[in-house]
Image (cartoon, rainbow, N blue to C red):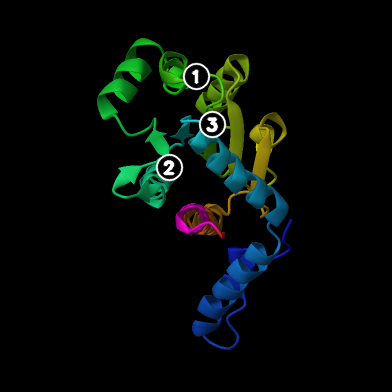
């Protein structure tokens, strides 16, 4: 876990307010450098592998993480566009406000993702749970259901990883002091763009190799 935090950086303004902005940027560089890149690579290849098998990537999150989940879904689908045909099926389960509010009202907010997953998910799919704390009850419930269904689980998390860090098959944790939501969410969006770009380039490279004429 990083020894830095935004409160300490804000208090250290001896060199003027601009010092905070510089330190915030340096803090992000520090957190990026300490990500587990082996796990990130494994997640990228997991998505590529399951896409070839026509499996679906489901994404879930609350609040700001719900919008990050939407961004992931958009970028994964776009990354998988070859010849105008999508290869990666990615769905943000936080997106349909009608379903989310109906389930929240009728079944309880803790069930808004798990109930959808039971209906839509299949063995071999992927569930990506995005959360800074890693302790949101509705995400925990969804991961439990995913495990019952044979769905591979990925946590994109912050702080110490929370309960999801131990539950998920793969966990990418932005390790910060608890409560540092802003920097965690910054890096979560960075992870989206890094994964999506790698997936897109990998698919295009594989397609280019297939098109090369065979040597006689």
- Residue 159 in sight in this render: no
Q: CA distance from mark 1 to mark 2?
A: 20 Å
| 117 to the left or right of 160 | left
Spatial distance from mark 3 to mark 1, Cα to Cα? 9 Å
Rounded to the nearest angstrom, the CA distance separating label 3 from label 2 is 13 Å
Is residue 131 positioned above or below 174 on the image? Answer: above
Residue where numbered disc 1 is placed: 122
Residue range highlighted in magenta: 199-214
Secondary structure beneath disc 1? loop
Q: Is residue 59 visible?
A: yes
Which residue carries the number 2 mark? 69
- What residue is pinned by disc 3? 126
At x 58%, y 65%, the residue is 6
Disc 3 crowd rating (10 Å Cα; few below 14, some 14-19, many 20+) is: many
Quadrant containing the N terminus in the rendered view: bottom right
Mark 3 or 2, nearer chain start = 2
Residue drawn at the location 45% of the way across and 43% of the way down: 65
Which quarter of the figure has residue 63? top left
Q: Nearer the viewer, residue 71 or 175?
A: 71
Question: Relative to residue 201, is residue 58 depicted above or below?
Answer: above
User: Disc 1 vs disc 2: which is toward the camera?
Assistant: 1
């Amino acid at each position: 876990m990083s020894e830095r935090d935004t409160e300490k950086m804000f208090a250290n303004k001896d060199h003027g307010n601009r010092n905070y902005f510089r330190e915030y940027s340096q803090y992000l560089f520090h957190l990026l450098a300490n990500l587990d890149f082996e796990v990130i690579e494994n997640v990228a290849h997991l998505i590529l592998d399951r896409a070839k098998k026509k499996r679906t990537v489901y994404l879930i999150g609350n609040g700001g993480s719900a919008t990050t989940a939407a961004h992931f879904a958009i970028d994964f689908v776009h990354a998988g566009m070859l010849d105008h045909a999508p290869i990666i099926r990615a769905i943000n389960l936080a997106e349909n406000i009608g379903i989310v509010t109906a389930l929240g009202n009728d079944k309880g907010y803790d069930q808004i993702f798990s109930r959808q997953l039971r209906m839509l998910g299949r063995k071999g799919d992927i569930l990506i749970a995005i959360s800074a704390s890693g302790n949101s009850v509705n995400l925990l419930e969804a991961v439990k259901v995913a495990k019952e269904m044979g769905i591979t689980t990925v946590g994109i998390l912050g702080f110490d990883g929370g309960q999801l860090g131990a539950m998920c098959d793969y966990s990418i944790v932005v390790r910060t002091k608890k409560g540092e939501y802003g920097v965690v969410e910054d890096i979560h969006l960075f992870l989206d763009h890094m994964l999506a770009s790698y997936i897109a380039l990998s698919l295009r490279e594989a397609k280019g190799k297939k098109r090369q004429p065979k040597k006689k």
